[in-house]
Image: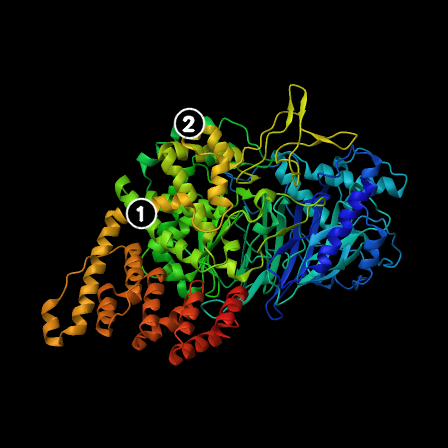
Amino acid sequence: MTENLQSCCLANWKMEMKLDPAKDDLPLMANTRHMLVKHYVLDLDVDFKSQVIEGTVVLFFEPGSRCKKGGNAGEGACLSQSDETCKIRASEPCHSPVTNVSARSSKTGYNDFAVCAKGEKDTSDKNGNHSNGEQASGISSSKNCCDIENHGSEDFLLVLDCCDLSVLKVEEVDVAAVPGIEKFTRSAKLTDAEELRNLRNQIVHELVTLPADRWREQLYYYTRCSQAPGCGELLFSTGTWSLMIRKAEVQAPRDFPRAIRIWYKTKPEGRSVTWTTDQSSRPCVYTMGSPINNRALFPCQEPPVAMSTWQTTVRTASCFVVLMSGENSAEPAQLQEGLLSWYYYVTMPMPASTFTIAIGCWTEVKQESHTADVRTNNEFSSLFSRADLRLIEGSCGHVAYPCRFQNPAASSQLVIPHRVFAPWCLKDRCAEILLELIPQCLSAAHATLGTHPFSRLDVLIVPSNFSSLGMASPHIIFLSQSVLTGGSHLCGTRLCHEIAHAWFGLAIGARDWTEEWISEGFATYLEDVFWAVAQQLPHDEAREQQELKALLRWRQLRDEVQNSEEELQVLRPNKENTGEVSESGTCIIKHGLNAEKIFMQVHYLKGYFLLQSLAKRIGEATYFEFLRKFVQKFHGQLILSQGSATFGRKGGQHIPQPAPLPVAPVGLERCTTAGGSCHWPNLWTRQDFLYMLLEDIPEQKGYGLSVENIIRAWLDTSGIPKPLLEECQTWDQCRLVRQVNDEVTKWIQVNQRARKRSKRKRRQDEVAFQKLLPDQLVLLLESLLEEKTLCLRTLQCLEKTYHLDEQDSEVRHRWCELVVKHKYTRRYADIEKFLKEDQAMGVYLYGELMVNEDAKQQELAYKCFAATQKQMDVSSAKVVAEMLF
């Protein structure tokens, strides 16, 4: 046992040494099966002049699944580093950092975190929304310096995910020095250093395991503990992707400090944050949801299984607004003239990758005169009312936290409190579009899936260099400015997509990042459903719009499959190894750094078509009743598409465990015997999505619908799934599609006549064109792109008929493609505007401009890239540069 784990530690280190950051696989280095972060306390200062975020993060740990007490003595020893590992590490810089890292504390005159530990008044409202009466206090630090050369070869090594950070100091936190902390101790008398160490670890254990109804008290003591003095610096070194920490002569994870403080600075070029200017030319910074997630924002554990809570204090100049993933709507505290402090917290454990921050001169967009009308489709929502009443009576399967799914008031809350923020220049447009749409989309989501997982929502219009149309994080949604053009259609559907992520992607997460289809497929499928309910469309009209959308997505998937690498088209690139990790918890995210993959839609589209196929087979009412049951069962947890086999105890017989889980299943305590083998106290079945679907609706097995068939046809193969090839022919018969086909025929005839007839005769042959929906316009333009030539007069007429320069960005993108294909020089200004203002969608237009080998078009591509390159998202810039150079 000892030799195996020593070899594992050495193998993890060698993996770090061999990794090339230019490759496309992303390493998750944190040894989460040895130590697991339960809570982060961040205390940060933001400096826009130097483009640096600096401060501290305090991490509170519990031993991981491999290190629970009760194992044999050999288990602790086997988690130490081997001599060979330490020899390798000797070549890395080991840090004895400067001690003057607390100078920043001189300006922190914060208010105390004003929460009563006992007999307090609960200021959260009945819907689970938390007030903002709390503010985090300052940090004091120890300046003791440790001898970095005096270390043994068997010390346990804590590994955190870390990249592009300057780590200044790491120290143990003396939580035992916090006044009033005695309530978390079993003994007040200490005789030696070992007992003091055990006391500190005991305090943290008691703190992180407090019952959910004591969440206020827990936050209070997290804050107080984070302010406690240091009690000794820890040895650390940094690699390309990790921060490695150890304490001399501590050989087992269970003896490692459970609370540590890390002093650090971000770097301006750090890949987790984007420093830029907004549309009003004011400075701002936001986390970008990049493939490396938050490891260049703060040292953390990136694997999804490291689900934690957090609280954050951010200080910045008073002209800035700080938005963040937080349950409370933060109100800033004035520290001194020109300096504000903002405080946010969450009590629902989530992966650190979901943490989001955005700081800028945002303006809150408010409703001035009337309240937006909230409309619901009563016929649709009535399908689920009885099921909801039954489901809320059940118990949750996640770890304890203040859960809205068990709160009757929250369950009946159609629209959660929400705010809209934007740069000043977009305020009026947001007021016109977003303020009306948000309550309608939130209400539609509730009518479909029930309880909103989160208590509040901020919606922010991010700068033009944002690389996507939207991104959802807990309590906050980023939207591209591109969704604000045209009518409400694109903005509404994108809002619905991001709102759907509250359930699929956030409340229910993928246990393996390579299975992103679980979140993106569901969000893509549900955006159509939510949007139909939000518009109060009759059933037949909703079905027609969804069939039109299916055809557009089919065409997109077909084109993407034809023009991408096969290995990037597989929804489960790890196949039967999906969900597996190393002995320590480290793993590799296949293609995680591939810049091309970021712009691919295959996981969205194939996932969407799989879910659509299942819904057709099962029937709408039955399918959505199952989805609600699935949400009720798995919210607050991580899932796989396939799940694992049944294991545990049944009739006293031990059922073998399948491939090792990264941690004990969420919501269940793991029991470790003296021999180190693992058992579950009761029978437990890993019913993830596909298994649960077929077990809940067993009659589908008679139609060849099995987990094995679905995985083989949809998840583990490249290309277009065979079942989809059989379905795609039906969408051409949709009324909305036939209508577009008729219009295409008219335009082809117009184009033919325009090339043959004189201007005088042409005026006598004007054609009456029908008004088209935005998605119909997209299909029309795509169909005309397939025509070999369109003459100048046809393009002019097309532009005038549909006012294409006023349409949404999806329509304008196709129009720009037509302009490029037919070298319509009079409208090159449309292309230039699109590439500058719609960067989230314009990447592949650069390729279109280059492929024709036309000097003017290539000059236009170079010109636009030169104007936007410095502000452009890193991945976007890399892809475009490869096209141009």
Q: Secondary structure at mark 1?
A: helix
Residue 294's image quarter?
A: bottom right
Q: Residue at x 28, y 63 (%)?
A: 784
Give the class, few, some or many, for how many residues have Cα within 10 Å of label 1's Cα (few <14, many ≥20): few
Most distant residue in the top direction: 651
In this view of the protein, can residue 283 be seen by the observer? no
Q: Which mark is residue 729?
A: 1
Amino acid on which the number 2 mark rests in the picture: Glu
Of 576 and 455, the residue lying toward us: 576
- CA gap, disc 2 and disc 1: 27 Å
Residue 342's image quarter?
A: bottom right
Q: Secondary structure at mark 2?
A: helix
Whichever of callouts 2 and 1 sits on the residue coming sooner in the sequence is: 2
Q: Residue at x 64, y 19 (%)?
A: 651
Residue 246 x %, y % = 80, 52
Judge left or right: residue 123 versus residue 526.
Answer: right
What colour-coding does the image apply? rainbow
Amino acid on which the number 1 mark rests in the picture: Gln
Give the class, few, some or many, for how many residues have Cα within 10 Å of label 2's Cα (few <14, many ≥20): few
Of 390 and 159, the residue lying toward us: 159
What residue would you read off at disc 2? 699
Of 608 and 3, the residue lying toward us: 3
Judge left or right: residue 375 versus residue 275.
Answer: left
Residue 245 x %, y % = 77, 53
In this view of the protein, can residue 179 be seen by the observer? yes
Q: Residue at x 36, y 60 (%)?
A: 810
Residue 25 x %, y % = 61, 56
Figure check: 268 above or below 354: below
Q: Quadrant of the N terminus?
A: top right
Figure check: 739 above or below 644: below
Of 372 and 517, the residue lying toward us: 517
